[in-house]
Image (spheres, grey):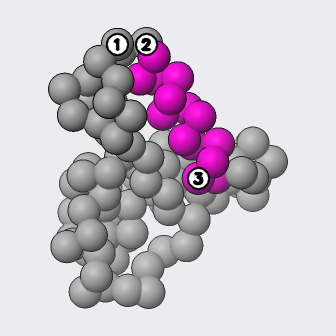
Amino acid sequence: MPPRSSNRRLARQYHRLRGEPTRTKFLSLKKGYHGTHWGGASVNGNNRFRIGYEPLLPGCYHLPSPYTYRNPFDETDGAKLAERIAEAEIDVIPSALDAGFAAA
């Protein structure tokens, strides 16, 4: 079993044991690589690695990468870029605060 897959399972188990079984969402970065197996492809930020494995694990969301040189917001200030990505997270996952999430 690849270690990345174990990490996702551990994150879900951790939240269940803490009494938060609804924390099942995973956030990852667009263009981020997390493997090509089924779970890794689900959180993988590269479409080329996901297409062959669909349908994938539900609850996986991809946020813009925080690169000040190239980003969808044309933002060069790191702090402002972080704010814009946080705003994008709210747009992508409107129920994240209600249902919880685990970082991938």
Which residue corresponds to mark 1? 77
Rendered-image quadrant of the N terminus = bottom left
Q: Nearer the viewer, residue 98 or 87?
A: 87
Name the mark on residue 92. Answer: 3
Which region shows up in magenta? 80-93
Q: Give residue 8's position: percent from left, percent from top.
A: 45, 56
| Residue 5 appears in the figure | no
Q: Which residue type carries mark 3?
A: Val
Tell me if label 2 and label 1 are in contact, CB under 8 Å.
yes
Q: Is residue 73 left or right of residue 90?
A: left
> Which amino acid type is shown beneath numbered disc 1?
Asp
Q: Quadrant of residue 70?
A: top left
The answer to whether one can see residue 96 in this image is: yes
The image shows residue 38 at horizontal and vertical percentages of 33, 77
Q: Is tag 3's residue or tag 2's residue first in the polypeptide sequence? A: 2
Instruction: Name the residue carrying label 2.
Output: 79
Observer-nearest residue: 5 or 60? 60
Q: How many marks?
A: 3
Residue 40 appears in which quarter of the rendering? bottom left
In depth, the one of 104 and 47 nearer the eye is 47
